[in-house]
Image (spheres, helix red, strand yellow):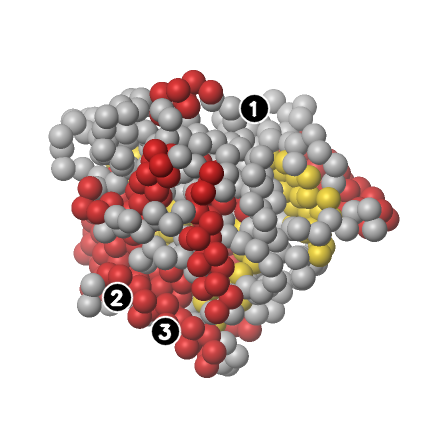
Amino acid sequence: MNSRSLHRFFTAAIAAAVSALSSAPAAAVAPKPDVLLILADDLGFSDLGCYGGEISTPNLDALAARGLRFTQFYNTARCWPSRAALMTGYYPQQVRRDAVPGVPRSGGRGFRPGWAPLLPERLKAAGYRSYHIGKWHIDGTPLAGGFDRSYYLKDQGRFFNPTQHWLDDKPLPLVPEGTDFYATRELADRAIAFLAEHAAEHRDAPFFTYLAFAAPHFPLQAPAGDIAEYAGEYDAGWGAVRDARWARIRSTGLLEGELSAPERDLGPPYDFPAALEVLGPGEVNRPLPWGDLTPVQRRFQADKMEVHAAMVHRMDREIGRVLRQIERMGRLDNTLVIFLSDNGASAEIMVRDDGHDPAAAPGSAASYLCLGPGWSTVCNTPFRRHKTWVHEGGIATPLVVAWPEGIAAAGGLRRAPGHIIDLPATLLDLAGLPAPEAKPAPGRSLRGVLADDTSPARDAPLWWCHEGNRALRDGDWKLVAAKDEPWALYDLATDRAEERDLAGAQPQRVAEMAAEWEAMMAGFAADARE
């Protein structure tokens, strides 16, 4: 059975499992699971096969078929804030890893306060050994943050020949051009090596493995053979692909409601007009109707999405290799596997690092392509907007969780809202460790959600702020505003697409939620100053 056939098989299996088993009783929670936490970069909500995508992701689809898919899980809309939240359990503003007005050393280069150690440092108390592989993008270095081993690939602008990477916090030589190297494959190799070492030298200890891929973040680069598997897949254009994704999402019961309307006048969050000149006449910085594009533009755009699909497909293949290593170790049944993305798909268009050669094959090392708003709108189906915005398209992530010994509802859906700040709380809980005491964390354990979709009790609404974009979710009500724009109000129970603004009809609710947002911002700023 080839990979595309496997994709169709697992998609059908998930649909059947959801229908038959979504209400199955929970099993007893197993103690101290091993953990494989996988973070994708710039992956859209609907990019995986098990979330409605046409991209072949049989390994992740299989995890979903024997585990859970979350339908309302959130990140922070950007890479480094999400990673800070994932490793600490606090909002990034609390730990100075997103900008806080009036707080020095906050933002993308901020440093955490001493009361916010990283997750692997906390897990040591339960006997865990921790391994980091891939992207970092938070303060400090991995071993200084509590990891026992690390392969840190910083140079995400060169998938074939990186110039900056470290082993156990020590620099490695650059990868020469022409070397048989591809970053996504290399990360799996390193993860497998660390796990094999764990089996040989630390088999009695539980492991926490944090595998942070750079894929499918720009530049869109992938092996030529992987790209060839998607030749012609996107020639019908972004409208047709988006409609097909939405149809699959609805057919599996993942989501209901409406498909958001493409925002034709909304382009990349940052303006780089010089990049458009370098990229040539095929690039388009607005999600225009496909029929309005020239033949050159349609070819250029379809080629880009073929590379994006190849990057996601390759990531899935490498995840499969890592899972097979854990299976060889005899530990897969008690391994909690968590997969999610750091933000929504990106509308950005830029040229950095080694630049872009217009004559180079799309996806090759000499090319520098970005997804752009046309395909980002597709990848974030059915939601509005993109990475950096805190509308649903920027912050909604697929979340696949599998744990054979701890989850009984194989193929189940979890509709309880959750946030990336909840994952550290969950792992500490399952490891038998107490929640932080020096500074109470806003995240809540999802142990109950894994069992029966019971929403965790929260002391406050879910909260977002990034580059002036801000939001608050209280129950099903979401208050959201783009930078320098007024608040809009949506009832997510009936309008996840954020199409019907109710702010004018409910000014009192808007005022109360806005005041709550401001109060939480003030509290986080106070935390950051400590």
- The residue where tag 3 is placed is 13
Q: Earlier in the sequence, mark 1 or mark 3?
A: 3
| Mark 3: amino acid | Ala
Q: CA distance from mark 1 to mark 2?
A: 51 Å
- Nearer the observer: mark 3 or 2; the answer is 2
**Image: 170 above or below 423:** above
Name the spot of residue 276 as percent of width and height, x first: 41, 23
Residue at horizontal 31%, vertical 57%? Answer: 56
- The residue where tag 2 is placed is 5
| Mark 2: amino acid | Ser
**Residue 530, can we see it?**
no
| Mark 1: amino acid | Arg
How packed mark 3 is, by other alpha carbons closer than 10 Å (few <14, some 14-19, many 20 or more), is some
Element under label 3? helix
Q: Earlier in the sequence, mark 1 or mark 2?
A: 2
How packed mark 1 is, by other alpha carbons closer than 10 Å (few <14, some 14-19, many 20 or more), is some
- The residue where tag 1 is placed is 105
